[in-house]
Image (cartoon, rainbow, N blue to C red):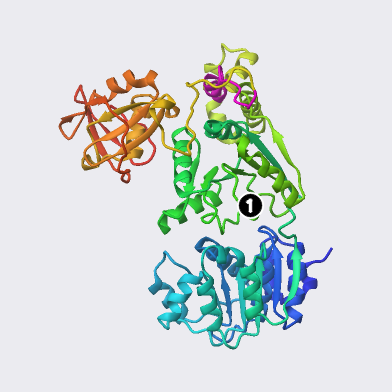
Amino acid sequence: MVTFEELGLREDLLQGIKALGFATPTPLPEMVIPAALKSEADLIALAQTGTGKTAAFGLPLLHRCDASRRTVQSLILCPTRELCVQVAGDLENYAKFAKHYKVVAVYGGASIEQQIRQLRSGAQVIVATPGRLVDLLQRQDVHLDDVHTVVLDEADEMLNMGFKDALDLILESVPERRNIWLFSATMPAEVRRIAKTYMRHPQEVSAGNDTQSNSNIQHEFYLCRADDRYATLKRIVDSLPGIYGLIFCRTKNETKEVAEQMIRDGYNADALHGDLVQADRDRVMTRFREGLLQLLVATDVAARGIDVSDISHVINYNLPDETEIYTHRTGRTGRAGRNGIAISIVTSRQESRITQIERKLKTTVQRKSIPTGVEVCEKQLFHIVKSIHDQKVEDADIEPFMPRIYAELADLTKEELIKRFASVEFNRFLAYYRNAPDINIGAKGGRTKNENSSSAGSTFQTDNGMHRLFVNIGTMDGVSKKEFLSLLTEEIHIPGSSIGNIDLNKTCLHVEVDPKFVAQLRKGLEDFSLNGRAVKVDNAKPQSGDGGGGGYKKRYSGGGGGGYDKKKYGGKARR
């Protein structure tokens, strides 16, 4: 087995690799690093995500830079800002013990003035998105005359995103370059054109290509009716209590709707899509990378740059049109030698696409049955049991409380204690799934209207069993969707799964709710007043809303005059 020490890298870089806990390279760095160090030839590397690309080009690139010179010597181009930040961070980690290197990331959505100041202070390596680098070139705030190596990371995706002209302009602005290293999962015609136009007799290496799938990934699909897609997603997630996963959607709107419905239903989820401002994108990604977010719902483009090694599951809420995109998505799991599971939710009309994927990737996609309510409850129960069994006990901290605990539980037998501890979370799932129908295609019985029937790929309609109500408060009153939803769930005690769309306008809002909770919602809301005005609820015809505002702190006054402060995040509101 080859070690990093045998690849010819400098000692200070080897120290950085060792500090990161890496001992042996994956196949791609093992092939690329010696070639990049010993040869002046251009390089094409075909590699899927998760194969060690950043180490493959980043380590030899740093090795070849002269730290004593404060000019830009190497340029790395990435398709998205997330990937740009990720690559720059990895290079800084590699160079932790090589004190004189400076890596600057330049990308849209952040202050260009701050990036210019960083460049002017001197940098050997720029990691950039094409659009922002073109802006800097046109302003003459960056000079690439001394660049000897250009890396095109995920070249196919940069072209898919429309950066062809930008890449041409950038490559023409690096007249004295010695090398281009092109990394791509696939080699469509446009990537071949760049290689033919700008590269000189490139050497090609491959660590898996577009006709192979990561052997660490198990592929599965669930067949359902179109209007059961969201219910199927819930069943899958509920049957995987420890899931740490990515859910891919086709469009920004679908991503928003799925994420909003999952949050409404109590899941630890959030969305990543192109409409988010940079600060929100960074917040969501930080929470996901740190494991504070269990499920991330994303579009394909927004998910570029997600380099999290321990993602357990990737779920295709809708199959992508191209097999290459399927490969990119599923490559987010099963990384760094770990095993992963790729799940697709498909309808009968899409089932033939599974056969195409199997043929193209030379793998098997196993059909699985949608979990029944009983199966979900069983999975949750034994997850709870295992959590209790494996719970670490801080003896010194809990010991002072044990006498009172013993006294409080003295009237319970061992069997009763076990049942009650196991029932803490189990009862919630049991209540929801007790009479849940089998939603597999061909199952007897079929699905009832009462099960949470949101497809989350389209807006709620009254013919889906929801009742639409008009409420006479809106954004002019300082109301936001998030806190109106909290009011319904926390104060009026309506289950989140029984609340549909909330369409928020300036002077009013419309809310959709399960018919069995209409009376409870009416009574609960009409107990409140807002800014001295009584809250009124009435029936409404379906209509579009304007969308909601941000969080706020607002005092609602109940009929008894008590009132409560509603905090922006979490906390229990009081009447």
Q: Quadrant of the N terminus?
A: bottom right
Q: Say if 54 sits above or below 70 in the image.
A: above
Residue drawn at x 60%, y 43% as measured from the top left: 315
Crowding at dot 1, Cα within 10 Å, few <14 / some 14-19 / many 20+, comes out as many
In the displayed structure, would residue 237 be above or below residue 495?
below
At 21% across and 38% down in the image, what residue appears?
507
Q: How many marks?
A: 1
Tell me if residue 25 comes above or below residue 226 in the rendering: below
Asked if the stretch drawn in magenta spans residue 427, the answer is yes
- Residue 94 is situated, as x and y percent measured from the top left of the image, at 64, 69
Figure quadrant of residue 382: top right
**Residue that extends furthest to the left in the rendered view of this protein:** 532
Q: Residue at x 64, y 22 (%)?
A: 443
Viewer-nearest residue: 116 or 536: 536
Is residue 340 or residue 190 the one in the foreground? 190
In the rendered structure, which amino acid carries the disc numbered 1? Arg
Helix, strand or loop at mark 1: loop
Q: Is residue 46 magenta?
A: no
Residue in the foreground of this view, choosing between 471 and 544: 544
Is 45 located above or below residue 172 in the figure? above
Question: Is residue 96 in view?
Answer: no
In this rendering, position of residue 69 left or right of residue 205: left
* On-image quarter of the C terminus: top left
Whole-percent x and y of residue 518? 34, 21
First to last magenta residue range: 424-442
Q: Could you tell me if residue 474 is visible in this image?
A: yes
Q: Position of residue 261 (x, y in %)?
A: 45, 36
Image position, residue 183 (x, y; %): 66, 68
Residue that carries the numbered disc 1 in the rendered image: 332
